[in-house]
Image: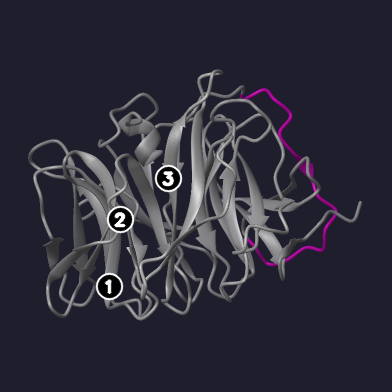
Amino acid sequence: MKTTLPFLLALAACSSDPAQNIAQQTNAPESASPFTRLVDPSGCVIEQITAGDNDQYQVQGVSTDGTSLLMAFRQKGAPNLDSQGYEMDLGTGERTDLSEIFTNSGTYSPDGKFIVVAQGSDNGKTDIYEYDRATGELQSVASHEDWDWLPSYSPDGRFIVFNSNRVDGQSDIQVFEKSTQTLRRLTDYPGYDAHAQYSSDGDRIIFHRQHGTREDGGYIFDLIVLDVNTGQETQLTDGEYAQTYPAWAPDGRHIVYSSDIDGQPEKLNLYILRPNGEGESRITKGDWSDSYAFWTRDGAYIYFNSDRAGGSNIFRLLMNGFECVRDVG
C-alpha cells in the first residue's frame, strides 16, 4: 500500500483560492520582525515568511540559533525535483542563492557545521547528501538506487534519520551513523512510514504511518513514537484520519502535527498533542493544507508550510510556551 510521491514529499503545492480571506492584520504587540504579521482564523498570531503563487517550502529548515532558514523555490507547475535551494536571513528576510549546491530544502546539523538534504540523483529519484559548510564538500549518505528522502539529525548530530524505499519498495525509517558509516533499519512495517524526527533527548523518534484509505478518498495516517533503545512502538492517534508530519517541542513534552480531522481529505490544520496521546489542542483553522510544522530550538516559533496564500509558502506561529500567541484585538 503506497501513496503517490507528491504526497510523500509534500513538494507539490495543493490548490487553494488566492482570493480567500485567509487572515487579517493582528493587533498583537509588534516586534522587530521583517515579516507581515497576521492572525489565523483560530485566533493564533502568525507571520508570513514567503509570498507569491510559486511554491516555496522548508523541511525543518531553521538553524539552531534561529537566525537562518534553509528553503527551496520552485516555479508553479514545474516538476517536483526542479527546485532551487536558498538560505534566508531571518533578521532581514534577505536570501542567498544556494542553487548550485542544493535543489531542495535542507536541515542544519545541531552544531551548524553541516546541512543534510534529499535531492535528485542521476536516476531521477532522490538520495541523501550531507554538505560540509567549511570545506564545501557534498557527500552522499548511504546512497541507494531507490528513493531516500526526508533526512534530519539526531540532537547530538551523530545520526541522520530518513525514510527509504530500498527494502521491497516500502517506505521504512532508516538511521545512518556518521562515525561508523553504518545504516540500521528501524521499522519494517509492510506499508509506509515517514517523516521521522528525534526527540531532544535522542531516546525517541516520532513518525507517521499510513494505515489505509478512507471512503471519502482521504488517507489514514497515525502518529507513532519509537523508543530508540528498546524498539518499542507506541501509537498516539486513533486511525480515523490523516494525522501526519509530527515534530517534537524542544523539551519533548508536546508534539505539533497536521490533521484533516475536519473530514476534508488533504486539507490539514495544525494541532498540539502530548506524547501519551492526550491533551490535543488546535492551533490553525481553515480550508487549506498546513504541513511540515516544527518548533524552533528556543520554542519561540512553529514554522510550517501552507497553501493558504496561493502557492505553497512558509509561515510561522508565535508561541508562548505550549500555547500560541493570540490576537489581542
Q: Which residue is mark 3?
A: 209
Residue 41 seen anywhere in this rendered image of the structure: yes
Disc 2 versus disc 1: nearer the observer: 2
- 108 w.r.t. 42: above or below: below
Q: Is residue 77 left or right of residue 324?
A: left
Residue 36 seen anywhere in this rendered image of the structure: no
Instruction: Residue 49: give x, y in percent of width and height.
Output: 56, 51
Marks 2 and 1 in Cβ contact (< 8 Å): no
In which image quadrant can residue 57 be found?
top left
**N-terminal-most mark, 2 or 1:** 1
* Residue 187 marker: 2
- Give how far apart the Cα atoms at labels 2 and 1 are: 16 Å
Please provide the residue range marked out in magenta.
Answer: 18-33
**N-terminal-most mark, 2 or 3:** 2
For the point 16% across and 80% down, the residue is 179
Q: In the current view of this chain or complex, which residue is farthest to the top?
A: 216
Instruction: State whether the magenta stretch is mostly helix, strand or loop.
Output: loop
Q: Which residue is mark 1?
A: 159
Instruction: Residue 222: give x, y in percent of width and height.
Output: 51, 45
Amino acid type for the residue under numbered disc 3: Arg
In which image quadrant can residue 32 be found?
bottom right
For the point 7% across and 41% down, the residue is 122
Helix, strand or loop under label 1: strand
- 8 w.r.t. 236: above or below: above
